[in-house]
Image: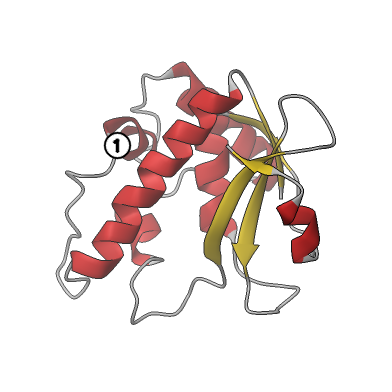
Amino acid sequence: MEVIPDGDPGEYARRLRDVLVAVFRLAVEADFDMDQVPVETVPGWFVQVCQGGAATDPFAVDGQARYSERTGDGPWEIQDWLSRFDPELEARGWAFWDLTHSTVGEGRLNVWLDTWGEPFFSWEELRWLLYTCGADSVADPVVTEADAWEQERSA
């Protein structure tokens, strides 16, 4: 998926990786059978934007608006969003592979996913994350050969 950040691509990449590291750690360590998955390790700005307008970081507020404009949906509630990473649920149709600098244009990033060969998969929770990290635009996913990924450098 091509992502065009609104601002510095390096800052965008850091925010995205910070959330993914926290949530993948929760996927391994948290008890998803509890009423609430702990959010203390998830970056505060992301928890706030999932509260539906409580965010104060401009990139997250703008991203929330762009997500709503693109999808017609409101914010994801944090516990609903985290539930997509429950390893027992198997609701997520993707695994994160890499984030790279696009060879197509300056400031563009590509999100690489493993979809287990499926051309269509559930990814709305990822679209929410990509926008709220500060994306100006997020392109729909396209199936691409791995050799294209090899041509790009990680962000």
x then y, percent, for residue 48: 32, 33
Residue 80 drawn above or below residue 121:
above
Q: Looking at this view, is 101 or 136 the one in front? A: 101
Residue at 17%, 60% in the rendered image: 36
Is 2 drawn above or below residue 61 in the view shown? below
Q: Is residue 76 visible?
A: yes
Q: Position of residue 46 (x, y in %)?
A: 36, 37
Q: Residue 121 occupies which quadrant of the picture? A: bottom right
Characterize the local packing of mark 1: few (<14), some (14-19) or many (20 or more) Cα atoms within 10 angstroms: some
- In the rendered view, tell whether residue 34 sits above or below residue 14: below
Residue at label 1? 43
Is 39 displayed left or right of 107 in the figure? left
The quadrant in which residue 66 appears is top right
Q: Is residue 62 left or right of residue 44?
A: right
| Residue at position x 49%, y 24% in the image | 11
Q: Which residue extends farthest right?
A: 104
Q: Is residue 77 visible?
A: no
Task: Return the x and y of residue 148 as percentages of the image width and height.
Answer: 80, 55
The image quarter in which residue 97 lies: bottom right
| Identity of the residue drawn at 27% across and 33% down | 44
Tell me the kind of residue under disc 1.
Pro
Question: Along the line of sight, which residue is nearer the eye, 109 or 46?
Answer: 109
Residue 15, image x, y percentages: 43, 33
Q: Secondary structure at mark 1?
A: loop
